Image (tube, rainbow, N blue to C red):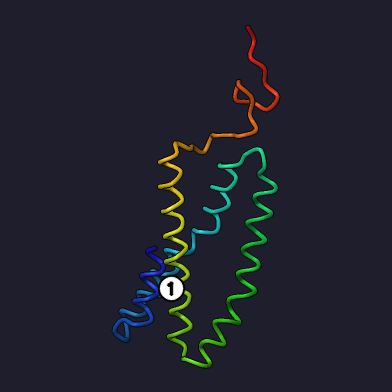
């Protein structure tokens, strides 16, 4: 969410040093997202780490292939500010979806160690010994 707000300030804030600082803040806010997403995905689904990392990588590639040309089109039609606003909106929506998913998981009592495929001992194929 901070990255989206910083990008909006960078686009619509006062010219000069405030915009430069806002772009730097955007980089600091959004830079750690990719490694964090990969780590959280592997932590939530340790039994499917390869599948999760493949799906997340594919999603990242699709986003990085589709959005830049779309942003360029928006920038040509409505100006660079409009294109950057689209990126800020996407960052805010992504942050809001993460917060919503976290709250939903908290309400349902889900934890990062829950494994729906685990047996009664918490291990795959585990058996309860009498």
Would you call the spot at circle 1 few (<14 residues within 10 Å), some (14-19), or many (20 or more)?
A: many
- From this view, report whether residue 38 is shown above or below residue 83: above
- From this view, report whether residue 125 is shown above or below residue 54: above
Residue at x 70%, y 47% (from the top left corner): 50
Q: Where residue 47 sits in the image (x, y, percent)? A: 66, 38
Which residue carries the number 1 mark? 88
Number of numbered tags placed on the structure image: 1
State the image quarter where residue 59 is shown: bottom right
**Figure quadrant of the N terminus:** bottom left
User: Which residue lies most toward the top here?
Assistant: 130
- From this view, report whether residue 115 is shown above or below residue 96: above
Foreground pick, 111 / 40: 111
Helix, strand or loop at label 1? It is: helix
Foreground pick, 91 / 101: 101
Q: Is residue 30 left or right of residue 120?
A: left
Residue at x 50%, y 59% (from the top left corner): 33
Residue at x 47%, y 62% (from the top left corner): 94
**Figure quadrant of the C terminus:** top right
- From this view, report whether residue 122 is shown above or below residue 71: above
State the image quarter where residue 29 is shown: bottom left
State the image quarter where residue 91 is shown: bottom left
Q: Where residue 45 sits in the image (x, y, percent)? A: 60, 41
Q: Where residue 49 sits in the image (x, y, percent)? A: 66, 44
Residue at x 48%, y 37% (from the top left corner): 111
């Amino acid at each position: 969410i901070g990255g989206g707000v910083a990008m909006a300030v960078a686009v619509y804030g006062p010219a000069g040093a405030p915009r430069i600082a806002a772009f730097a803040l955007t980089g600091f806010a959004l830079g750690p997202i990719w490694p964090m997403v990969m780590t959280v995905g592997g932590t939530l689904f340790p039994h499917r780490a390869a599948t999760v990392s493949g799906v997340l990588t594919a999603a990242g590639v699709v986003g990085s292939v589709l959005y830049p040309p779309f942003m360029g089109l928006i920038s040509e039609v409505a100006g660079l500010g409009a294109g950057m606003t689209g990126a800020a909106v996407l960052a805010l929506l992504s942050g809001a979806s993460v917060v919503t998913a976290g709250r939903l998981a908290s309400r349902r009592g889900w934890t990062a160690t829950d494994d729906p495929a685990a047996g009664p001992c918490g291990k795959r194929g585990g058996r309860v010994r009498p």
